[in-house]
Image (spheres, rainbow, N blue to C red):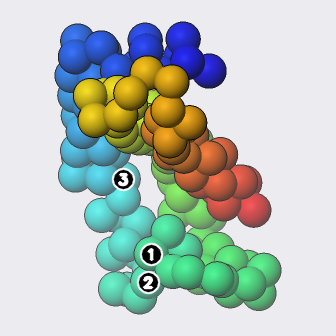
């Protein structure tokens, strides 16, 4: 784990991962189909914008879309997986960069920098659910 933290905490790695994550999110949410999907759902909250939705909520939203927007929404979900992975890696790298400079090499607290990876796994589970 220490080796992974050391690799992720390199400034060049942090800049690359942060840049990729931000750039991908801008394209996905700003230039991609997200705004079109929001319009199709008539301004109501999408599943991505809600916390704790049920299967009934998901089925209701997907039924309201119609075939074209439902297909577009599923395609968006595939790209959102990549977004979750990039975001988790970028946040892990940023936290690793910070904690390796604040804490001694043998500090167990440096393992906290891996928490964003857990959040990334949770995001993937949420996108699958």
Tags 3 and 1 in contact by the CB under 8 Å rule? no
Q: Earlier in the sequence, mark 3 or mark 2?
A: 3
Residue visible at 56% across and 81% down in the picture: 51
| Image location (x, y in percent) of residue 93 | 37, 29
State the residue position of label 2.
45
The label number, if any, that marks residue 33 in the structure image: 3
On screen, residue 73 above or below 100: below
**Res. 94 in view:** no
Q: Answer few, some or many: residues within 10 Å of disc 1's Cα (few below 14, many 20 plus, some between 14 and 19).
A: few
| Image location (x, y in percent) of residue 85 | 52, 36
Tags 3 and 2 in contact by the CB under 8 Å rule? no
| Image location (x, y in percent) of residue 32 | 31, 47
Kindly report the distance in space between the C-alpha atoms of the residues bearing marks 3 and 2: 15 Å
Horizontal side, residue 94 vs residue 122: left or right: left
Kindly report the distance in space between the C-alpha atoms of the residues bearing marks 3 and 1: 15 Å
Residue visible at 65% across and 54% down in the picture: 122
**Res. 117 in view:** yes
On screen, residue 10 above or below 69: above
Please, what secondary structure does the residue beneath circle 3 have? loop
Horizontal side, residue 62 vs residue 25: left or right: right
On screen, residue 111 above or below 61: above
- How many tags in the picture? 3
Using the rendered view, name the quadrant where residue 19 is placed: top left
Please, what secondary structure does the residue beneath circle 2 have? loop
Kindly report the distance in space between the C-alpha atoms of the residues bearing marks 2 and 1: 6 Å
State the residue position of label 1.
49
């Amino acid at each position: 784990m220490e080796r992974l933290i050391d690799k992720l905490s390199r400034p060049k790695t942090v800049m690359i991962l942060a840049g990729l994550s931000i750039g991908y999110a801008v394209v996905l949410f700003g230039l991609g189909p997200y705004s079109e999907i929001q319009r199709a759902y008539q301004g109501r909250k999408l599943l991505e914008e809600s916390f704790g939705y049920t299967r009934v909520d998901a089925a209701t939203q997907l039924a309201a879309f119609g075939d074209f927007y439902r297909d577009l929404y599923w395609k968006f979900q595939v790209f959102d997986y990549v977004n979750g992975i990039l975001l988790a890696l970028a946040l892990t790298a940023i936290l690793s960069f910070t904690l390796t400079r604040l804490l001694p090499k043998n500090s167990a607290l440096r393992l906290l920098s891996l928490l964003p990876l857990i959040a990334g796994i949770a995001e993937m589970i949420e996108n699958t659910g």
